[in-house]
Structure formats: structure tokens, C-alpha cells
Amino acid sequence: MAYTVLARRYRSQRFDEVVGQDAISQTLKNAIKTDKVAHAYLFSGTRGVGKTTMARILAKSLNCLSAEGPTVEPCLKCDSCTAINSGEDIDVIEIDGASNNSVDDIRELRQNAIYRPARARFKIYIIDEVHMLSTNAFNALLKVLEEPPSHVKFIFATTEPNKVLATIQSRCQRFDFSNISAADIIDQLKKILTEEKIKFEDDCIIALARLANGSMRDGLSLLDQIISAGQQPLTVKMLEDLLGLPSSEKTYQLLEKIGTADAGGTLQAVDELLNTGLSCTGLLDAIVQSLRDMMILAAAQSSLVILTEAEKKRLTEIADNFDIPGLVYNIAIFEKLRWPIKNSDNPRALLEAALLRVALSEHFMSIPDLLGAKAGGGSPAEKLKKNTPIIEKPLNKQHEEISAPEKPVLDSTADIEQIKQNWDKIIEFAKSSANARIAELLKKAIPLRLSGNLLAIGFSASDEFWMKLCQSNGRAEKIVQVLEQGTGLKLKVSFETIGEASQNQPKPKPRGAKASQKTIDEAANSPIIKTVLTELEANIIDVEEQQ
């Protein structure tokens, strides 16, 4: 006997069995109970969400021979129900709109529609992918759709309702099928595997639900594929091997290397993933998906990600090395890279360059720093730090590596002067203690004073953005922890801005006041600013004059 795939064997037979479309099922049941069934329906939604299944259930409910009239509980045993299930009923005609899309096909439908059904109550036309009909075919359908015989019902299904003529839609009751939630897909897959007596790991089912992307049929097709391997229990490793998916753990290791600014480790992790046969595009998709999950977890919305508890914990730990604005920016970078990688003769080089750009972002110069350097002055932060000792770093890191300190930089008797003199060492301590992002934020700061156990840290007015980053997403607590480990002191931390304009200087223009067009034009003609605007493909919105 031929094998029947799971998607067909476990197709829903009644309204209550349709997964994830409760509102539509209830509406159609109420229409049948109150004898208010429309003559035409348009079911729209992505693939595999139950459009054709719902159309067949509606047809069985209208034509079930075991009931005296339309019923919400078809018997599934009469000749009509069994024939509809197999797609062979003479009164329920299923038409593929993609291959029967000409005006002649619709004219034939119109000619046959006038004849009464052979044995059932209604002659029902189910047209799948109705958006594929030609314009002339749609126009030929209009008249019969507007004034159909009383014994005819139309059910249209489409994945692209925007391509269905408005004149057709206005003559139908439209139902939009939603994507099926991951929780519903997981429950259904577990139910099927239990009935099939197949052992499985919960993590594998969660991964399958994530890959199904809201489509029950896709989930069942993937389940069929992994079952065909003939091994039990079903595992995530089997799924990755059969579908050629990147290892989630190796992807997380790559993100971890990026988060700790480990250039060599990043390239090594990329090499390991690509050596498994994964394409650069496939790896890019995995990176973007993981960055998205990290962004959601960093925003404390763990219910919005389809991950196991172990994966949530792992990504949450990695996300500590990033901030939400950085994750948003990184996702945008990699999405823009998709098209160039697909069309490049050397996609690996583009991918590696982009990953290193993100991993080493702390070494790139910001726009204020760039303008300050070009102008020959230096950024305000550099001017504030001119009296702070600077630790020179070797240019060749292959011969000298910074090892993690075994003890704090200072002891519990340190005062503010010692903290100032050893600030760069404290930053290096933070970086070597796997807190590279916190160390990068502390580079923008200057210790100001120590009152009791309260350490005041200052940021220049131009670095106010960095100060806000320190105060958001729980970073203040992490900064306190890092400074306590580095100084040996029990601390509290406050943040201040320094280097603001004095009271004797002219007041800045009022908030919201725009610079004159002349000022904007003069700024735009500056060679330095021209370069920045060209590189960033940007425009000047306003000019704020520093007093």
C-alpha cells in the first residue's frame, strides 16, 4: 500500500479540528446554523494554514447526505463526505486556478453551473490560487458570481488576495487566515508523533515549529522528512544534518566572538560553519535570525522567540555583550548585505569583512571624532583626558597578548587620585574579564570624585549619548560590578556631564530653533562635512553651533 504523507493523513475533517483558525471556524458554523451561508467566499492566507481544508469541510457540511440539511458536524462516512475527502465528488468541483486560468475555462464553468447537482444539495466550485486567473477570465466570472443559481456555491482560495480584482472581492465574503502560532504547531506535531508512536526530543519539535514559520503543512512536511531517516528519538542534530542547517551552537559561538571583539575567533567560527557545506547566504540568514532573537531577549520579551530554555539562556548571556541599538544596527547591516552576497564572485570575503566590521566596531572613528581629527583639534573627550596617563599598546598583538588579571588593579584603600591614575588599567581589567562592551563605554568616561562609596563618573557634553547607554538596559549595575572587581572597593556610581558652556558665554539658540539656510549651506560646503555626507549618503537637517 502506498505511503500517505502526514499532511494528508492528518488533514482536519471537521471545523473544530482546524488548527489556529478558531474565529473563522466559529463564523462558518454560525452561518450554517442560522442558514446564512453566502454564495461566494474568498479564503486568503499564506501556504499551509488551512484554506483548502476549510473549503472542503464547508463543502462536506453543506452536502452531507446523512443529515436532513446543512450541518456543522458532517458524518464523514456517507458517499458525499468520502468523495469530497478524496477530491472525486461530482458535485464538488476543485479547480486549480494556475492551470485553468483562461477565459474558455471559466466559460465552461458558467455553462455547467446552470445544471443542478447530481445527488447533493449544492454544486460547489472550489478554485485554488484564484489570483492566477487572467483578467478576461475574472470578467467572465463576474456575472455568474453576482447572480448565481440558488444551488451553486463558490469558494476561492488565494495566497495573494491583492491580485484578485476588486470587483470579484466585492461579491465575496472574505476571510483572512492567520499564520498558525508556534505553540499550536508544537502541540499538533507532538500529538501526531504520539499517535505514530515515534520517540522525539522536545527541542527538535521546537526547532521544527520555528522552521515551519506559521505553516502547518510545512511543519508536517519537515516532520515527514526527518522521520524518513528511520532513527529514534528525533533530535535537533538529525534535523540540522538532514536539512543542511547551521549548528545553532556554532552560530552562538560566532556571535559570542563578535560580542567580545575577538577578530581571530570570529574568522575561525565562520570557517567552521562554512566548512560544513553551509552557503554564505544560509549563514547570513542564521546570523540575522539569532541577532533578532537576541534583540527580543534584550528587550525582555522572551515570549516572542521560539527557542528552548537552554537557547534562551545562552543567547541572553551573549546579548550582555551588545546593546539594543547596536543589535538593530547590526541586523540592518546584514540585511543590506544579502543582495551583494548573492551576486558576488567572492561572497565569503564580503561576509567576513562585514562580521569583522561589527566585531571591531569599537575601533572605528565616530563622526564627532572624525570631524575633530580633520579639524586638527581632537574630540572633546580627548581634551578632557589630556592629563590622564595613557598606556601604550603594542602594534603587533601577535607577540603580546593581554592576560586576565588575577587580582584587582587597586586595593580597598584606594582614593580618587589612584582611580584616576589607574583608570586605563581598570578599563583593561574590564576588557580582559569578558566585559568588552562595558570597557568600551568606560573609555568615554572620566572618574571625577569619590564621596564615601559613591564614585562620580563624568562624560563630556558631546558624549551624552554614551552616558545614556550606561544608564539603560541594566548596564549601570554591570558597570558597578566591573568597577568593584577592578578597584577592590564597594561602590555606587553616578553619571554626570562635564565640559558644558559657562554662564558668561552667549546662550545657545532656543530648543527647536532651526539654523538659517545660509548656515546650513556653509556647513555643506565644508570639505570635511562633504566627505562625511558622501560616505553616509546623508543630508544636513540642522546645524547646532557650539558656543
Image: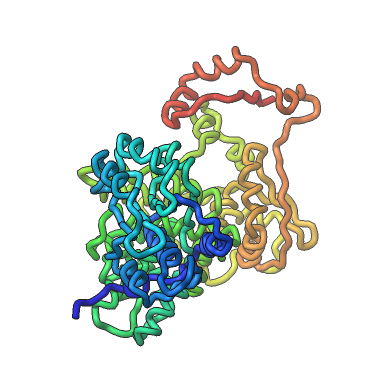
Q: How is the image coloured?
A: rainbow
Q: Is residue 305 left or right of residue 462?
A: left
Q: Residue at x 62, y 67 (%)?
A: 485
Q: Is residue 400 left or right of residue 231?
A: right
List x then y, in percent, for residue 170: 48, 40
List x then y, in percent, for residue 492: 73, 61
State the residue lying farthest toward the top. Answer: 518
Front residue of 400 and 267? 267
Q: Residue at x 58, y 39 (%)?
A: 382
Quadrant in which the C terminus appears: top right
Q: Is residue 240 left or right of residue 297?
A: left
* Above or below, 250 relative to 203: above
Quadrant in which the N terminus appears: bottom left
List x then y, in percent, for residue 4: 26, 74
Q: Residue at x 71, y 27 (%)?
A: 512
List x then y, in percent, for residue 531: 44, 25
Front residue of 110 and 185? 110
* Above or below, 278 relative to 80: above
Q: Answer with the quarter of the image where residue 429 lies.
A: bottom right
What count of labels does the image hold?
A: 0
Q: Residue at x 52, y 27 (%)?
A: 376
Q: Is residue 174 left or right of residue 479?
A: left
Q: Does residue 52 show up? A: yes
Q: Does residue 223 show up? A: no
